[in-house]
Image (cartoon, rainbow, N blue to C red):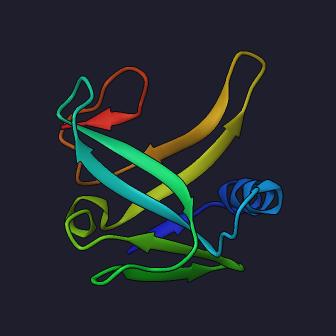
Amino acid sequence: MIQLTPEAVEAVKSAMSRATGPATGLRIMVETGGCAGFKYMMGLEQAPREGDAVVQQDGVTVFIDDLSQPHLAGMKVDFVAGLESSGFVFDNPNAASKCACGKSFG
């Protein structure tokens, strides 16, 4: 379904270790919006919801809702740390176009 780079795995593990509430995984989903038509949404989650695909990789659990699954199939998620900004980077083969910030696609 999706693949996390080692850097993304470590970033998720770090976020989970600092979470104030119970979190067993990361939810990645797609919503309508953003400058290119769809936007990526991410957040820590306690448990899967009905219809979720559950992806396990290197000790990290990812939840993907049924509506987002077709948009995210084959996607690679990386985490880049830089001087000016740090964050997750999405390499999505389903995106026909993407915005300059890399957080939305069409």
Above or below 4: residue 46: below
Seen in the picture, residue 89 relative to 52 is either above or below; the reply is above
Q: Position of residue 6 (x, y in %)?
A: 71, 62
Task: Answer above or below: position of 60 versus 91.
Answer: below
* Rendered image quadrant of residue 68: bottom left
Measuring 76% from the left and 56% from the top, which residue is drawn there? Answer: 20
What residue is drawn where x is 51% and y is 67%? 3
Number of marks drawn: 0
Instruction: Give the answer, above or below, for where 18 lies relative to 31.
Output: below
Front residue of 73 and 12: 12
Image quadrant of residue 97? top left
> As drawn, is 13 to the left or to the right of 70?
right
The residue at 23%/59% (across/down) is 71
Nearer-the-camera pick, 16 or 83? 16
Looking at the image, residue 19 sits to the left or right of residue 67; the answer is right
**Image quadrant assignment for residue 102:** top left
Q: Is residue 75 left or right of residue 58?
A: left
Q: Is residue 28 left or right of residue 95?
A: right
The x, y position of residue 33, in whole percent, is 22, 33
Q: Name, please, the residue furthest toward the top.
A: 84
- What's the residue at 37%, 79% (across, down)? 49
Q: Position of residue 106 (x, y in %)?
A: 18, 37
**Quarter of the N terminus within the rendering:** bottom left
